[in-house]
Image (cartoon, helix red, strand yellow):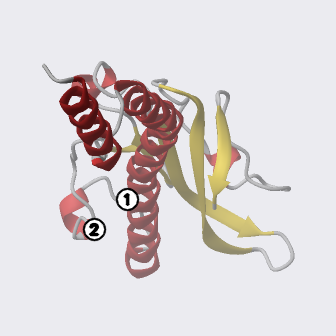
Amino acid sequence: MNTQFKAKFLNHLNQRKKGDKGFTLIELLVVIIIIGILAAIALPAFLNQANKAKQSEAKQYVGSLMRAQQAYYLEKSSFTSDVNVLGRPVASDTDNYTYPMVITAPGTVTETINITGKNKATKPSLKSYIGGVALAVIPATSETTTGALLCEATGPNTTPTPLTQANIAPPAGTPTCSAGTVKVGT
């Protein structure tokens, strides 16, 4: 081949290479690694927010049950364990929790909100909640009213100890949660 032709051909190929646009394999790998690191940081935060939303469901539902019990007591001067009488303000069973209601002592209703057995294995990071409604005496006037207390289990996948009249409406002092739980609302 002619040397002048070879030089022109190589020059043409060299000019053509400069005009080609694209990414090298190294550049693509660096971008993929950066995206992977960002995803690894964001995913746990996202999952934590999803669990908080599920737990918020439980807090809202048990609060609704307690308010319904207080309204029932205002009308009938007694508590009930029949959820149909309350007009059940919430579903009795959801994907994340079940909502049984138990009368623990005369004049006291405790709604225990626990993770259902079917979900303990699949949702081990959810916390349990327990709420209660009880009669309370206002010390200054000696009038009777209802007191309410909502407690959250200190760890996930644990069942809280039932509340008592002394927890919800102590003769003197503020309501306190039972062992293994912390107060989240009254």
In the rendered image, the vertical position of residue 70 relative to residue 19, given as above or below: below
| Residue shown at 30% from the left, 47% from the top | 21
The front one of 180 and 140 is 180
Find numbered disc 2 in the image and state the secondary structure of the residue it sits on: loop
Q: Position of residue 61 (x, y in %)?
A: 37, 59
Residue at 47% across, 70% down:
70
Dot 1 alpha-carbon crowd within 10 angstroms: few under 14, some 14 to 19, many 20 or more: some
Counting other residues with Cα less than 10 Å from the Cα at mark 2, is it few (<14), some (14-19), or many (20 or more)?
Answer: some
* Residue 24 located left or right of residue 106: left
Q: Give the residue drawn at x 64%, y 52%.
A: 184
Point out the residue furthest to the left here: 1
Q: Quadrant of the C terminus?
A: bottom right
Instruction: Give residue 66's position: percent from left, percent from top.
Output: 45, 62
Q: Residue at x 44, y 34 (%)?
A: 126
Q: Do tag 1 and tag 2 residues touch (Cβ < 8 Å)?
A: no
Image quadrant containing the N terminus: top left
- Please state which of the two labelled residues, at mark 1 or mark 2, is closer to the viewer: 1
Instruction: Residue type at mark 2: give it.
Output: Pro
Give the number of callouts: 2
Instruction: Name the residue carrying label 2.
Output: 89
Percent x, y of residue 162: 53, 34
Pinpoint residue 100: horizontal percent, then vertical percent.
Answer: 30, 43
Identify the residue under disc 1: 61
Which of the 4 image quarters holds residue 171?
bottom right
- Residue 111: which numbered mark, if any? none
Dot 1 falls on a residue whose secondary structure is: helix
State the CA–CA distance, disc 1 to disc 2: 8 Å
Give the amino acid at mark 1: Tyr
Question: Which of disc 2 and disc 1 is earlier in sequence?
Answer: 1
Relative to 6, residue 39 above or below: below
Could you say which is closer to the camera, residue 125 or residue 13?
Answer: 13
Q: Is residue 173 left or right of residue 125?
A: right
